[in-house]
Structures are given as structure tokens and as C-alpha cells.
Image: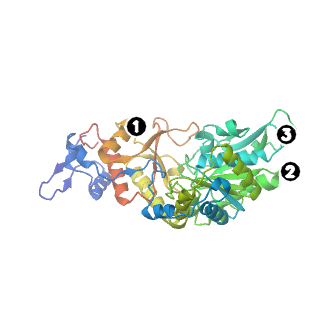
Amino acid sequence: MIVTAATHAKDKAKLCVISTGNRMQYLLKNNCMRSTRMSTSSSTSKRSATVVDLRSDTVTQPTPEMYNAGITAKLGDDVMGDDPTVQELQSKCAEMFGKEAGLFVPSGTMSNLAAIMSHAAAVPTVGKEVLVGAGSHISLWEQGNVATFAGAHTRQIPDGPSSVGSMMKVNDIRRALCCSDDDDHCAKTVLVCLENTHNLNGGQVLNKQYIDTVGELVHSELADPVNLHIDGARIFHAAVSLGVQVNELCASADSVSICLSKGLGAPLGSVLVGESEFIRLAKRARKALGGGMRQSGVVAGMGLYALESHVDRLQDSHVHAQRLAKELANEGFHIAHKGGIVDSNIVFFCMPETARISADDLCKRLSEEYNVKLSGGYVRNDDDNTEPGRGAMFRAVTHYEIDDEGIDRALEGLVTLCESDDSSYCIR
């Protein structure tokens, strides 16, 4: 049944008769039934000048204080090892994570690749493999660079989401390990990689017990131990969610890649930490990959500021993401992972089954009519929680530029567009 909104001109109270009381309370609470929605011509009035950008936590702009940290940083030639700000950043990260040394690189992808190249180079054999999660960033979104540049291939282990969350099962890792090169048919395992938080599993956090268990397996159970690398693009989100320090969380890892631009707000850069010899080889890999930077203390200074000032703000992003997920679920949206529980700052969701708008049109109209930017089109072949017929997932990532008003506007746009037949506003 279609029931249109009626507007009282004097006090602009929003009234509507609908069949679901929860929907009525939500609309009234968020003041999202406006008479301007009744016509296409007036839809542009809903657009705010402030962008609510939920595509990623890499979209943030440096704060004025961060800019100042960059322009006042002491500089030198980092390729020659002469940039004092880069040296400070590398030392600070190594100390924070309880490792011997650090290496500043332009991106998280390069950090992971340099780590794998360094670990692989330390194993004198022909035919090498790296164990990774099938849904990990290394597996899906780094262009297969391990095979191209590291002289190794990735063996992918299921890590898909379920109603209780998911990760690579320890027994699956154990069965996949090939720690000897005696059999000429088999590649030798040189590294196991974990991702924390796990992007495609909805920002799922891997806890210390799990990481330590994997570390115990690869370091102690094997006659020929294997190293453990953590892709920690959002490792501080994991630590904040768990209420632990990063050195405690990553104690069992031989290396960690730390991104400064995801959530922390730096314009670019990652730091790779590990033992001194590992970092020496990774530095050689960085140079070969074109990652040597000269007066990079400008951005390293911003990274230092991010570490010192923005880690404590990550909890706010978790609160906003959890609220977004909860209210979308109440409106019939499907929260894709872990039974709708959000660990950190990432929400994957599908539209309600009753939605009459395409995924492409939803993203387009959110941007045009509400100034809300959203990413769509995420799929997983091993996803046992995205129900048949729901289609591809959308991803919303919160960060320090997203506030309560931004979440309100995102919810308003998503709910309204998924319940409307066209540009007119109707409730079904």
C-alpha cells in the first residue's frame, strides 16, 4: 500500500501513516520526511555542501596541525639515510611494535611486497610459496605482485565470513604448510600472512590469542620454522577495538606493515617493522620497486603527528560504524558479516530485498541528492553469509571526518532511496 506524506505548513511537522511503527519512529527521529522529496525538481535542496565520504578511510584531508608538522619537519635525503624525521618515524614505529627496526615506504601495497620479498630472499631454495587468506588484500587487490616481483606464488586458504566471523583456520594453515623442499614437485612455504583488521570480512579484528596460536604453529611446531607477517593496514583499529597495545597484539609476528593513511589521516605512507636484517633486505626491495624517496620527512612528519594525535580518535569511528550497521539492519538492510556485528570502522551491507533501485543508481543518487559517497560492487565467491539474490555488497568506512550528522544523512539517503519507486517519495 502506498501512503504519501502530508506536511503542516505552520510548524513543518512531518506526519505519515505507515504499517511499521519502527519506520515511523525512525523517520520522525531523524527528521527525514521533507516535502521537498515529493518532487524531482526540489530534490537538489536535500544536498548538503558537506561531503559525507564513506568510500574509504583514505579520503581524509590532513588537519591544519598535521600540515604544520609536515612543513616544519627537519629534512634530509632519505635514500642516503639522512632524513632525521624519517629516522624518527621509523624508530618510533619499531619501538611501538616491539621490533628492532622500521622502514618508511610510500604505500601499504609496497610495504607488503617488500616484506614478502625480504622474507623470501632469506630462504635459499627454488620454488617458494606464501600462505594468504583467499579474501585478503594481498590476494585480491595487489595485482598479483608477489608472483611478479617476489619469485613466489600465493597459496590461498579460505578465510570467508560466517555468522560468527571468520579467519584462516589454524588446521587449514597447518595442512597447507610445506616446510621442506625435498619433494621437487612442491613449492616450499616461506611465509604466512594475516590481515588485521580484515577488510573484506567487514573490518573483523583478529585477536591476540589467534595470532599467537598461528605464531606458535609456524615458529615452534615445525622442524623448519616459517615467518609470520601481518598486513596491519588498520592494525591500530584492531588494537583499539581489543583494548590492547600494538606491541602486545603483534608480539608473535616477525613483521608488520603499518598504514598511516587509513584512519590515521596522513596523506600517504606505511612503515614496515621487523628485525634489523629483515629491514635491510626490505630496504633493498624498496629501492628496486621505486620506493626510495628523498626529502620525505615532509610526509613522515605528518605520519608522526598522526601516530601521536589520531590513534585515540579511532574509537569514535567504531561507534559511528556500529550505529550505521545497527540502524540499517533495523530498516531491513542485510549486514553481511558476523551476524551483523561490527568490530571496527567498516560496514559491508546489501540492500533490502524490497528495494527497487539498482546498485549503480543508489550510489549515483546518494552522491547527487545527499552528497554521500559510497562504494559498491563487492562480491565474494566463498561468502556463505551473503544470501542468494541479495546481489553485490556495499562498503561504508567511517573515519575522523564522519560525525553524527554525516551518519544521519547517510541513513536518510539509503533508507529513502531504497524505499522509493522513483524520485518521488513513497513508503511501501
Residue ID at (57%, 46%): 161
Mark 1: secondary structure: helix
- Residue positioned most to the right: 182
Q: CA distance from mark 1 to mark 2?
A: 51 Å
Q: Position of residue 15 (x, y in %)?
A: 20, 53
Q: Amino acid at mark 3?
A: Asp
Q: Which mark is residue 223?
A: 2
Residue ID at (35%, 51%): 51
Mark 3: secondary structure: loop
Instruction: Examine the rendering and report whether any part of residue 88 can be seen.
Output: yes
- The answer to which of marks 3 and 1 sits earlier in the sequence is 3
Q: Which residue is mark 3?
A: 181
Q: Which residue is mark 1?
A: 359
**34 relative to 161 in the view: left or right:** left
Q: Position of residue 20 (x, y in %)?
A: 30, 50
Q: Amino acid at mark 2?
A: Ala
Q: CA distance from mark 3 to mark 2?
A: 13 Å
Q: Amino acid at mark 1?
A: Ala
Q: Position of residue 189 (x, y in %)?
A: 77, 43
Instruction: Examine the rendering and report whether any part of residue 168 can be seen.
Output: no
